[in-house]
Amino acid sequence: AAVMAPLYFLGVVQFGGGGSVEQQQQITGTGTNNEQGQQQQPGLKGTASSSEGASDSPMQVKPQVDDEENANTAKDDTDGATASKEDSGKDRDASDEESNAGAPDDILPGNDAGDDAKETEGGKVNANDAAVSEIRDEDDDKGDDGAVTTPEETSSVAESTELQKDVETVEEKSPVEEEVNTEDTGGAAPEASLAEDSAGAVPEEDAESAPVETSEPTPEPTLAPVVDTRPHDVKVFEALTKVSGDEVHVEGSPQNKAAKFMALTDPSGPREISSPLFLQRYALASLYYSTAGDDWKPCLGCNPNARPFLSEAHECLWVGVMCLGIGKVVAIDFGKEGIGMTGPLPNEIGLLDSLMRLSVPNNKITTIPRSIADTPIVELELSNNEISSFPTTLYGKRTLEKLHIDRNNFEKGPLPDFSAIPKLQHIQAQYNSFTGTIQPSIGTRLSKLRNLDLSFNSLTGTIPPELGRLERLVRLDLDNNKLTGEISPDIVSMSRLITLSASNNMLTGTLPAEIGALASYWFRNGLSRDKVIRLDNNRLSGELPIELSDIHNLVEVSLHGPENHFVGPMPQAICEIMTLSVFSMDCSVVDCSCTVACQCIGDYSPPAADEDAVTTGEDEGPVAADHANTADQDKDVTVTVEEESGPLEEENTGEITDATDGIMSVLKGISGKSIEREGSPAYRAAQWIVLFDPLERAEDDPRLVQRYCLATLFYSTGLHRFLNDADECTWNGVICDENTRMVVGINLQGQKLIGSIPAEIGYLRYLKSLDLSNNNLGGTIPKSLGQTEIEHLVLSNNSLRSPFPETLYNKKSIHQILIDRNLFTGSLPKWALIPNLTHISAFGNNFVGSLDPELGSLTNLRVFLVSSNQISGSIPEEYTNLVNLEKFEIAENMLSGEIPPALFGLPRLTSLSLANNHLSGKIGRLVRNMGSDWSKEGERKRKYVRLENNYLEGRIPDDFGEVEDLYLVTLHGNSLQGKMPESICELEVASSGFSFALYKLTSDCGNVDCSCSKACQCL
């Protein structure tokens, strides 16, 4: 396979890696001699690096893929290597093919053994060639073979290849001014040409016919070079206009600000237009201004070599920027935490003609530019942003391998045509609003696909049997959709699939016997991988196939759910699977208690609990144990303690000696007699504490209780494998106070937890933050949480049920309650009784009843999200007292009546979403005051108004367009009349040039025509 020169992280944020200071010095040529700097850059002359040299560089840009996904060893990949370069017009040397054929796969980002060339729309581009190509290879004066024909250009090329000695060398002014044009192949790039044709030069044919002087040679006439005497800033703006169009001249646009930076304010001094990296610096400046760079909060301290954006340093040293040795940007990666980027990615990103990775998750980016297809992009990571559409220009993109667009705001509609991006290996599109079906072509055209996650959308139809053709697929996650039909034998027998997850759908039929062949590839090749099957909460039936026992290293099987109607006894072969950690089932249908991994979830009734209850302490009286009240929380859990649980050598006999009676007495005081019920989480945790825990904490040690409660939580949710002999403050997801070493936080979001939250968690007295979101937890919220100092309760996206614990009422410590996307029913909780609440998120449940007028007393409330429930009644007038409210979203309910006029004008409101209800009346005239406090405080916030699909009537207020930074207005599906107000028609329309202009305006154009605005969509 072709080999790419190492990619040096000259300015990367050190969230998860990067080079040391010494390595950075070697790269940039500082702190070392030039010879050392050159030795750090193998392959710059177009020769293949050895595998040894490649592995020595810790700074190569490589896709971040889980270990099991990278298990495609020589046994996996047998594709033949191709080393052709179709657009070069000539074949490679045989010697080059021979040397590249033996290069290891992992040198190229995301490369498979069968992928030896990265391909773009303009043809295949070998990654090594990309590393050694000159700054632009479209110079008019180059011949077909790429030879440089002028001494001046030869000098420029020599300088660029010496960049490892001094990264600024590429800034040397070329004696020939370059013009900025756009390549025919896309991706606006500078094209070198003579500023003026050499008028007066003797044509070759005339020179041959001219008379020859024999006495003295006539000196050849020379012309003085044409010198452009215009000011530098004028030339810069002219050059950049050819790239970005008139946006460069629109005062205040990102392109205008970036152009001013390049022409006037760059602290490193004006960069000559002829510089090969002129457009690169401009593109990065455009990114900065387009995404509110002044508000970024990057981690400058994470990398001592990183410099702020727009500083005097070379752009390769700017934070988050990674470059090749020749100074070309190959990656932009600000880490996983988010830095506060807001707005669209600019079209100028397409000028980065070596960009292979763009990783900007957890921000507020709104658009993916079409020009991204002009780059050789390999990894596009845009998770958890505000993107609403997918650029079709990426269809046919043959370099793209990793695509993460999960947790965005994609509008309801079909999935992007992923099958049109033929080299995709990783697709993450979960937590969006995609509808429609899963395209069968994904299975027939994406032969290299390894990960497919489409969970938490609204997809319908069947799981296409064609997905079974994906021979390299390792993970398939289709949870929480609306899929129907039977599961094809082709799906359950995929040879490399180690995670098959399709919980919370409407799948029917039986489990095919072919499931025994699931993930068989790994065992056949002597490789160990844990296998997981999650099919709970569907409509499956029939007997459990005994072939489940044929799956090697099967650790989890989840089949519970009220509509899964399995029959018959549990096959003994399944009972004897030694690797099982979790086997969840409705035990009233199929009793799984023959295995210690059994978790009975559903209608199964355990033995009645006794009078021993979890108590709240001396002064508060008893709180009935959740074990006693909720079957989901009192199940025959779980699992034997595996080797991963710590250095456990002896078998648990269940025997308690006199020496440990004191400890058992303490633990029984917490959990009651449930601690004696063999197989329960409390029993398993107590056995581990008493018999196996090497720390052996004394019964009077307050951290004994803490350790036991965490162990109970881990057993109750399937995380027991993380138990170990270290201090519990180092356990996965546990946060402790640095001084007291008491637990103050638990963050286990997205850990695939199942089971329920145990009541013992209430004994973590100092617990302030609990985040168990994005899991598959059932049961209820423990009442015992009222005993803690809880401030932030984050339980979003699980399967939790009512009731909401009344013990949390009147707790002054609580600020945030996030319980959205669960299975809560009944009336909304009495949140007005929790006086210091600032955030309430309960959308996506099944709450009924009306909105509580008392909620208007929570003057600190900033966010109230209860969309997608079944709430009826009207919007209480008292809600206009919520002067600090920023987001009020109650869409997709059954609300009626008129909207309180003052609600539109709340001074800090940025998002008002009332769509898809039965609301009537008129739009309040106070709307012009919406969110007005932000500008008074010197801040800018986009404003969103969603009113579609109601029964609103009358005229749209004339001053509606006076709302500052109005970004989105949806008015269709109402009975509004009259003209669209001029104040809206005259608003600037969002483009790559504006972060706060009007982006979308919808209307029933038969009633109110919005075509006066370019943002108009007639619906």
Image (tube, rainbow, N blue to C red):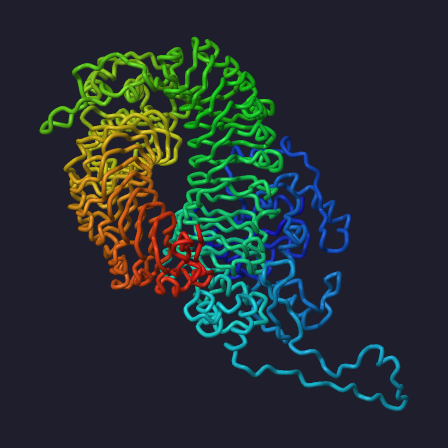
Viewer-side residue, 205 vs 83: 205
Please name the residue shown 39% across and 63% down the image.
Answer: 985
Viewer-side residue, 732 vs 541: 541
Q: Is residue 549 left or right of residue 408?
A: right
Q: How many marks?
A: 0
Vertical position of residue 938 compared to residue 404: above or below:
below
Residue furthest to the bottom in view is 215
Viewer-side residue, 843 vs 107: 843
The location of residue 367, given as percent across then percent down, is 46, 53
Vertical position of residue 420 compared to residue 175: above or below:
above
The N terminus - image quarter: top right
Please name the residue shown 44% across and 53% down the image.
Answer: 1018
**Residue 222 shows in this picture:** yes
The location of residue 225, given as percent across then percent down, is 66, 83
Residue furthest to the left in view is 619
Q: Name the image quarter holding residue 227.
A: bottom right
Vertical position of residue 783 compared to residue 174: above or below:
above
Q: Is residue 244 left or right of residue 102?
A: left
Vertical position of residue 991 compared to residue 625: above or below:
below
The location of residue 175, given as percent across then percent down, is 63, 76
The location of residue 817, given as percent across then percent down, is 25, 39
Q: Name the image quarter holding residue 106.
A: top right
**Residue 307 shows in this picture:** no
